Amino acid sequence: MSRKLAAACVAALALSPVAHAADREFFVNGALGTSQARLGSPYGSDYHRDGSDITTALRFGALWRGQPWLGVETGFVDLGRFSERYAVGSVDVRDEARTRAALLGVNTTYRFDAPWYLSARGGWLHSWVKVSARESQAGSTSYVTAAASATASGDGWYMGVGGGYDVSEQFSVGAHLDFYRVQVSRNGADLGGHVGTLTVQLEYRY
């Protein structure tokens, strides 16, 4: 499903009619906000890494004027770090999952007569999750500590809605609510879950 969506996005960009070149604009936008995650264990345990963190994103692509505007986008998003503490016998374990992803998708924007707009986007997501664990055991005279890490990757999807204000013909500021479906695996072990983000977005069109 995600591979077909990615292929469709690439085809939409490559096959855009030259006749509409005058109506085309390129854009770049950056986002900063907060993320909330719920990620499952790659080891089949019943605990989850969850919590909130800071998220950032950078997107760029092309837009075609109309009502609504239609576009294609690609970019990178850092979804943050999420951790969990639990005990295994007398051992205290703290593990952490840092989640980052590349994306490729489509977007649409409806611009009202006033400078306000509504937008939506969605597409393919390729995630990398770096999982690290730190184990501490209380001894009679000292703390014994062990640490390990590994990175898993895989394909998922994302979608989101938002709105904002066109400050000028080139600049916009808005807020966006996005949902990222993270699906990664390593050595036969799966780590699935989702991350929701709420961000402020600045966009420049040229």
Image (cartoon, helix red, strand yellow):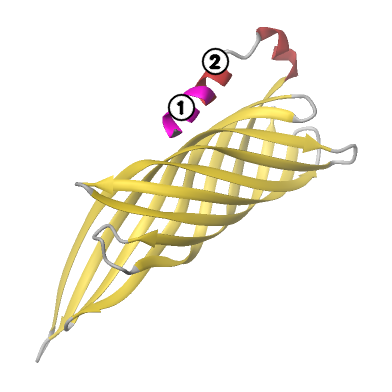
Among the 4 quarters of the image, the one containing residue 172: top right
Quadrant (top left/top right/bottom left/bottom right) for the N terminus: top left
Q: Residue at x 58, y 50 (%)?
A: 178
Vertical comparison of 187 with 69: above or below: below
Q: Position of residue 203 (x, y in %)?
A: 67, 40
Among the 4 quarters of the image, the one containing residue 118: top right
Secondary element at tag 2? helix
The answer to which of 1 and 163 lies nearer the viewer is 1
Vertical comparison of 199 with 23: above or below: below
For the record, the magenta segment spans: 2-8
Secondary structure mainly formed by the magenta segment: helix
Residue 185 falls within the magenta-colored stretch: no
The residue at which mark 2 appears reads as 14
Q: Residue at x 35, y 60 (%)?
A: 40
Image check: 203 left or right of 76? Answer: right
Density class for disc 1 (Cα within 10 Å; few <14, some 14-19, many ≥20) is few
Query: CB under 8 Å between callouts 1 and 2?
Result: no
Among the 4 quarters of the image, the one containing residue 49: bottom left
The answer to which of 66 and 201 lies nearer the viewer is 66
Q: CA distance from mark 1 to mark 2?
A: 15 Å
Q: Residue at x 11, y 87 (%)?
A: 139
Q: Position of residue 6 (x, y in %)?
A: 47, 28
The residue at which mark 1 appears reads as 4
Residue 7 falls within the magenta-colored stretch: yes
Image check: 51 left or right of 111? Answer: left
Q: Inspect the image, locate mark 2, and give the three-letter code of the amino acid beneath it.
A: Ala
Secondary element at tag 1? helix
